[in-house]
Image (tube, helix red, strand yellow):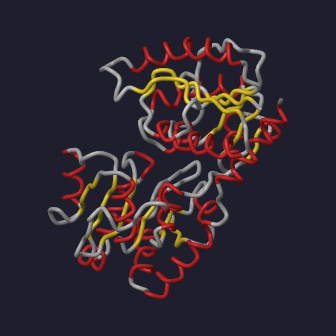
Amino acid sequence: MKIAFDYQIFSQQSYGGISRYYSRLTTELLKFEQDVSIFAGVHRNNYLSNLLNGVVKGRKLAKYPPKTAKLFLRINHYLTSYQMKLWKPEVIHETYYSNFTPHLTNVPRIVTAHDINHELYSEGLDKSSLITQRKITAFNRADHIISVSHNTKKDLIELFGIASKKISVIHHGSIDHISSINQYNSGVKYFRPFLLYVGPRAGYKNFFGFLKAVSQSQKLINEFDIVAFGGGHFLSDELIKIKSFGFKEGQVKQIGGDDSVLVSLYQEALAFVYPSLYEGFGIPPLEAMACRCPVISSNTSSMPEVIGDAGEYFDPKEPESIKVAIEKVVFSQSRIRDLKTKGIKRLKMFSWENCAKETLKIYKNIV
């Protein structure tokens, strides 16, 4: 089958969970001897360089010139539409949400919904919002929608009024980008025990709700540092807020780096804390499990669906609940061992091979 992935997410992400999903899905589809091409245009994505020669149709720039991202999206739309027309795909998988009118209107289209956090945390479905307009256009245009979790499917039905039969749930695969790394080569070591947080910190990610909870426990604030991986350096207002919670200077650290640094942090941390109010799927808990790091997580949205019994849960809106859950784990060696064991077992439920196999079924059905 001739399967085309479009340019969208590869024009917008150098790294990121969504572009990693499509590059990993492509790798598995090729193992099933499918004819796959990614029409990436002039892109800036780093994962595409790991794919087989000839799969990616496009050219990589280290970065776009300032204020040209929208221009490149438009250029890539017209460029790749022409390339696809010559290639004649049997199915097109759109990699994000676009308002641009497609040129190949006779080819079946798939779109994957990764989360609905914008609508949920912008006071509901605001049809004047640009990103919401794009989602509505993409969902209406698609012949079928893949949802990464049952929770996200529920949100699609409730918020966008999409028929259940138009949506199929296919979970992401496991995290081989983490488990394949030589896990002790980055040199990141800490002498003081720490709790690990991963990813962006603003809004619904609830980083400061997590810090507030820790600050309300004298035992936790006395015995643990906090390490935040990714998300960029702390801004001045973030540093002020951290100080206001009573943390000592340097007790809350921000660390950046590649996957090898992240793996070392997962392995050094006493626990990984995931305080997000909402996630469409949630890769970091699976990464933590692969590194035998106990998971302490919110009990909302897709988190219980993904984590199962391999996590200690809390209500992310209640600092007391967060505090109690963390203390229950970090001060109990038996609970730490239990979560590590259950985490390794839980990972077996998520396979990129199965993800690709189920996705291929969708392609064949709509064709």
Residue farthest along the front direction in this orientation: 53
- The structure residue drawn at horizontal position 70% and vertical position 45%, both measured from the top left corner, is 153
175 or 305, which is in the foreground? 175
Does 184 sit above or below residue 138? below
Residue farthest along the left direction in this orientation: 249
- The structure residue drawn at horizontal position 47% and vertical position 73%, both measured from the top left corner, is 292
Q: Is residue 154 visible?
A: no
- The structure residue drawn at horizontal position 43% and vertical position 40%, both measured from the top left corner, is 15
x then y, percent, for residue 293: 45, 71
Left or right for 233, reference 104: left
Left or right for 281, reference 325: right
Does 284 sit above or below residue 331? above
x then y, percent, for residue 118: 52, 37
x then y, percent, for residue 196: 36, 64
The number of discs equals: 0
Q: Is residue 358 visible?
A: yes
308 or 293, which is in the foreground? 293
- The structure residue drawn at horizontal position 24% and vertical position 71%, both measured from the top left corner, is 190
In the picture, which quadrant includes the N terminus?
top right
Quarter of the image for residue 25 reads top right
Does 161 sit above or below residue 24? above
Left or right for 43, reference 89: left
62 or 331, which is in the foreground? 62
x then y, percent, for residue 112: 65, 37
Left or right for 232, reference 333: left
